[in-house]
Each structure stands twice: as C-alpha cells, then as structure tokens.
Image (cartoon, helix red, strand yellow):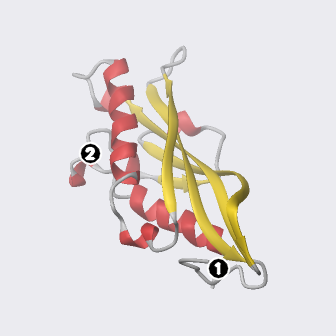
Amino acid sequence: MALNATTITAALVTVLRTVTAANGYVSNVGASVRVGEVRGMATQAPACFVIPGRGGPGEARYGEARQVIREYEVRGFASVLDHPTISDYALVDTVIWDIRRAMESYEPAVDSLIQSLAYRGDRPGYREEGGNAVGAAVTYELTYLVTLTDPETVLTAL
C-alpha cells in the first residue's frame, strides 16, 4: 500500500496518459507522462509532467483525521513540428484545454480518493530561440483526507 498522496499522484498520471491523439486529444501530451521531473521538459515533447507541489492544512479536522490541500502543477508540451497547420498560440491554448478536459472530467479512480479538485490557473509557454516546443503549466488544488496514524487508508468523510 502507498501513502494517500502517492496514490493520488499515480491516479493523476493514469488520467493524463489518456491525453493522446488516439483518444481525440489534439496536443497528444499524454504520449509520455512523468512525475517530478523539471529539467529538459520542453525537449521531450509531446509530453506531460506532473509536479506535486505544496501541501497545507484544510479546514476540517476531527480526531486523527485531517483535511489536506495539495497543489499539483501539470506541465504539457507539444512540438510545433507535429502540428504544422496550427499557430504556436493556438497550440498552447490546445495544450491547456486538453489538460483541463482530462483533469476535470469525472474519473472514478481519482474522485474516489479526493474530496475536490479545483482549477487554479494556467501559464502559457512559447518557443524559445531554436526550440520547437510550446506548452503550458496548469495548476490545481486537490483536497483529500488523511489519518495521522494511518496515511494509507483513504477516508471519504470525517
């Protein structure tokens, strides 16, 4: 068994792996999904990177149970060479929308682990000199419950 936070991250990876052309997503950023990598991202397009971020306490607390709010950043990159008929800025918007569509759709494997998922914003990224990748970082906050003495058991309510 794994810690709740680890199980949630793995479930998000599974969801993001569906963001492929075969599943109707234009950007194809789910072709490769990695966790916690921050170097060389743009050179691996099409790809998606899940960056588990800062966590903090939620409002609820009861006995050993605690509510946790954790930030996740999903960075997606697409190659402009794979999309010659789409402008750079339109491809950036497509990457954002593809990530949002996957992350914000009902997915039982994720929804059974969390209380809520909230979109917090996105940050576009354009080609740098000599590069062929564009993309975006999309930020979410996930709220879930954990027990201090048993951080592997999923709680659905306090």
Q: Nearer the viewer, mark 2 or mark 1?
A: 1
Using the image as rendered, state which of residue 59 and residue 107 is in the foreground.
59
Could you tell whether 157 is left or right of 86 in the image? right
Which kind of residue does numbered mark 2 sit on? Tyr
Q: Position of residue 9 (x, y in %)?
A: 57, 63
Which kind of residue does numbered mark 1 sit on? Ala
Could you tell whether 14 is left or right of 2 in the image? left
Using the image as rendered, state which of residue 79 and residue 91 is in the foreground.
91
Task: Write down the residue under mark 2.
Answer: 25
Residue 59: give its label. Answer: none
Other residues around mark 2 within 10 Å, as few (<14) / some (14–19) / many (≥20): some
Residue at 48% in and 19% down: 127
Looking at the image, is 6 positioned above or below residue 19? below
User: Alpha-carbon distance for marks 2 and 1?
Assistant: 31 Å
Residue at 37% in and 71% down: 108
Q: Can you say which quadrant of the picture contains the C terminus?
A: bottom right
Q: Position of residue 84 (x, y in %)?
A: 26, 23
Task: Write down the residue under mark 1.
Answer: 2
Residue at 38% in and 36% down: 95
Looking at the image, is 13 positioned above or below residue 44? below
Using the image as rendered, state which of residue 74 and residue 131 is in the foreground.
74
